[in-house]
Image (spheres, rainbow, N blue to C red):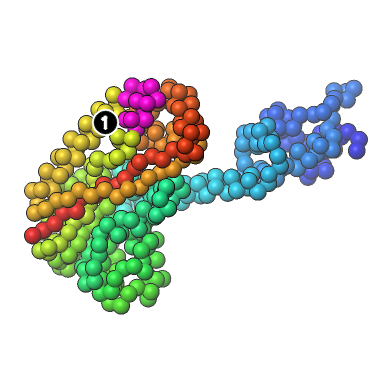
Amino acid sequence: MDKMTSGEIARKAGISPKAVRIYDEKGLLKPVDYSEGNYRLYDEQSLLILEKIIALKHVGFSLEQIKEHLENASSDNVLETLQFQIEMMEIKRYELEKAVKCMKAVIARSNGRPDWDDVAEIIQKMEVDQSSDEGHFHALKHNADGLDWYVKLYHSLEIKEGETILDLGCGYGKLWRHSWKEIPKDISIDGYDLHGSWADDLEKFIDENRGTLADGTGIVLHWGDVEQEATWKEIEENMPYSMVTAHYLLNVIEDVEGLVSRVSGVLKSGGMFSVNYFGMNAEQSFWQRTFDDAGLDETFVRELNTDKQRRHDEFQKLLNEYFDRVDYITIPSPMAYDTAEEVFERAVGHNRHVEKYLTEKKDLLLKYFDDMIKKNGQIVVQSEGGFWHCYKA
């Protein structure tokens, strides 16, 4: 094939000559030669590259990503490229869904008359709610024991036939969705959350799957703010409960002691309250050892652990004031990583208060993580979730 000008190769590819010029300027499609009049010239291989650029752009790659792919791809692995892009687009879709949820929540929770204070407060609370959801997605991808986190959490409750359960801040309801067929018969579950939250999806799920629950078992979703007096008046009409759960809720509650006190009041004798808040975690110790072994000053981790232990002890003291027995249980959730970059991201995510320091030491940490992965095949981060099980005599 004779060499083509930018206009000719553009016509063959079905794009504009301007696009070809942009790809040249961005370093994606360089001309193979120039004419005597200094016009860009391209050959058959150029056309193949251009078609690949167009294809990647159509499936969502940015020009920067396409450039990186063209420079680093050792072979034309179409399957690997598409699988990577699917993963990236799933993340983008999830982020868009979160944004839509937040905006709907602002409108719903302000009765259609939001102001900017409403927006700031509600989005902050939604982000906390959704961060636990993101943590679950991360756990599903990296869990080292192959077990779903919410299934482990469900089993820790040891729910028995005939229980009456109050789920405060039920959200998306993964505690129930992921163990739906394991819920015993004759169970009554009252879930409470706000309209415009992930609980809207739970309502749909319950309606669609109600008929598949065990005999005598039912879940009812109630709309209400668990910090409002009216909500607790409704809850008290259905009391007492044999079990109350408040998982991933207290971080968005202003009056923590008020909620603990109310829960104590609606729990029947012999009942159990399952809650998480400021709990110590094996992962703190893991990072302290890791940073020390890597040659970093791990003082900041030790200081963080001291602060978390203080808050842990303060919350346990509060629980002891309202319940007759308080047990702190941990649910193992080891995370396995096979790239140094992923381990570094986990380290930063767990130690946000020193992100700048860790970023400055990134090269040192990446080398350390790489060495550990070469030696062991992967790095397993010893993580766990902590929950208080509080009992009423």
Left or right, 357 with respect to 164, comes to: right
Please tell me in which quadrant of the rendered image residue 23 appears: top right
Q: Position of residue 79 (x, y in %)?
A: 65, 48
The question of residue 248 being in magenta is answered with no
Q: Position of residue 299 (x, y in %)?
A: 29, 24
| Residue located farthest toward the front when viewing the structure as drawn | 375
Q: Which residues make up the magenta segment?
A: 287-298
The question of residue 296 being in magenta is answered with yes
Which quadrant does the C terminus fall into? Answer: bottom left
Q: Is mark 1 on a helix, strand or loop?
A: helix
At label 1, which amino acid type do we have? Answer: Leu
Q: Residue at x 29, y 71 (%)?
A: 184
Please tell me in which quadrant of the rendered image residue 112 appears: bottom left
Q: Where is residue 323 in the image (x, y as percent from the top left)?
A: 10, 53
Left or right, 239 with respect to 123, comes to: left
Q: Residue at x 38, y 61 (%)?
A: 178
Q: Is the magenta stretch mostly helix, strand or loop?
A: helix
Quick one: 107 or 346, which is closer to the camera?
346
Which residue is identified by label 1? 304
